Amino acid sequence: MDLSEIIQQRVQKAQGLRALGVNLYPSLTPLHITVGKALEEFQEAKVVSLCGRVTARRSHGKATFLDIRDSTGKIQLYLKEGEIPEQSFLVLEHLDIADIVFVKGGLFKTRTGEPTVKAEELVLLSKSLRPLPEKWHGLKDVDLRYRQRYLDLVSNEEVRKVFVLRSKITKSLRDFLDDKGFHEVETPMMHYIPGGAAGRPFKTHHNEYSMQLFLRIAPELYLKRLLVGGLDRVYEINRSFRNEGVSTRHNPEFTMLEVYQAYANYEDMMNLAEGLITHIAQEVFGRTAFTYQGNEISFNPPWKRVSFAGLVKEKFDIEPSDSEEEMLKKLQARGFAKEVNKLTRTQIAKIIEEVLEQGMSLNPTFVTDYFASLCPLAKNRKDNPLISERFELYVAGLEIGNAYSELNDPIEQRSRFEEELKDLTADEQKCVDDDYLVALEHGMPPAGGLGIGIDRLVMLLTDQPSIRDVILFPLLRPQEEL
């Protein structure tokens, strides 16, 4: 039977129930407990009221067994003709897999020890006009899983677990920062000027003000305005947007944690990142050892530190004092970017970082000593102005975090912004954020800032190969029809 025939058959059942006076979609749900609580507090003959989706049906003469599931678990129902009200029997006769029901009855265990509800009442709460995928054996089509995530969640228990864990990770993160005196804040998602990170923005338009706006690349410059305003410890779990490529590590819309602490520097941010992620691992998972795509990873501190400048010198013979032309020549001598005559420093940095990622340690590693020319928002080291006070955090080849000692000199910051404008490619758009510079001119305390990619962190901790596996609704090309 094809899908259209199944749907038509279900529509006819729905019409039959309506003709018998059954409300297919009642607005009032009777008081009930979760399946998980019923199983946890199981007691023979105890009367419980439950709600859930029908996932299986088995008939034995005048007896029918149903399985129902809610977000906390699955339980079996036993219904026998003549022992349930006529209205409940009518519902049972017209019931399909995927319908959502309310049931009331006493608990007991079958001869095989299966916890079961002997139904005294069955009420239809929602009639499903479409069947579940692949007869409830799980949704296998990867593209369809992402497009119809609701079916993925219904049919794949492991997928539900990932997103429950994501919620717990976020809660643990908040608890850790709140306990350290940080305040969670919200900053604008629509910006007059794209800034705070390197990236191509999405553009939008505000009709009433007749003005062009940009979806934020990062919340950094607004959060640092709050440091100027006297909020010394702030964080935001933010949605950010970059109009760039899509891969197993990149989605145009993603979730970041950004943290800013006054009277701190990038060394303090190392300690914060190490403590935060170790806390999440212990609190949510009860361990610091994980397996990611077959590789063993340990989050036990202290984490390794390596020098970006040292790695680049070793692999490419590139020095922080080299010009863009010199860097490009040295890359091309080793087989990279042979087809181009000019690259910006940002583009050169991306090539270098992609190569370094492949040889990075599986265990958490802080990469320090970035070239100052690649870090327009970071302070330079006092002992070497060509090197910035910055680190990036890598785990299993994934860049998870980025942190600076924040530049708070408004004159130097303006100079760097203006220098950045000379380095833009034709499809990039940026201008100097004068309002941010005015804020700095009022005095921003020395501070450390930290960004952590929530999606990638969840990938690591739940052993998921693609960022799409940890985002409920990843961006996909539209289909004409599902």
Image (cartoon, grey):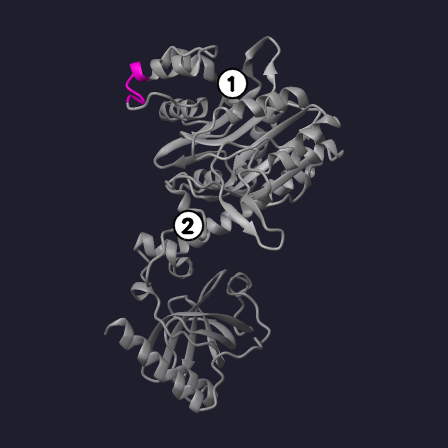
Q: What percent of the width, then of the height, locates residue 350? A: 41, 26
Location of residue 178 with respect to 316 vertically, above or below? below
**Which residue is the site of mark 1?**
373
Q: Indicate the amino acid at tag 2.
A: Leu
Quadrant of the rendering where the C terminus is positioned: bottom left
Q: Secondary structure at mark 2?
A: loop
- Camera-near label (2 vs 1) is 1
| 139 sits to left or right of 264 | left
Q: Residue placed at 54% from the left, 44% from the top?
A: 215
Location of residue 322 with respect to 7 vertically, above or below? above
Dots 2 and 1: beta carbons under 8 Å? Answer: no
Q: Residues within 10 Å of mark 1 (few under 14, many from 20)?
A: many
Q: What percent of the width, then of the height, locates residue 210? A: 59, 51
**Visible residue check, residue 209:** yes
Magenta portion: prevailing SS class: loop
Q: What percent of the width, then of the height, locates residue 475? A: 41, 50
What stretch of residues is rendered in magenta?
332-338
Q: Indicate the amino acid at tag 1.
A: Ser
**Which residue is the site of mark 2?**
475
Q: Residue placed at 44% from the left, 47% from the top?
A: 470
Residue 357: quarter of image: top left
The outermost residue toward the left is 1
Q: Residues within 10 Å of mark 2 (few under 14, many from 20)?
A: some
Viewer-side residue, 66 vs 268: 268
Location of residue 267 with respect to 283 vertically, above or below? above
| 12 sits to left or right of 280 | left
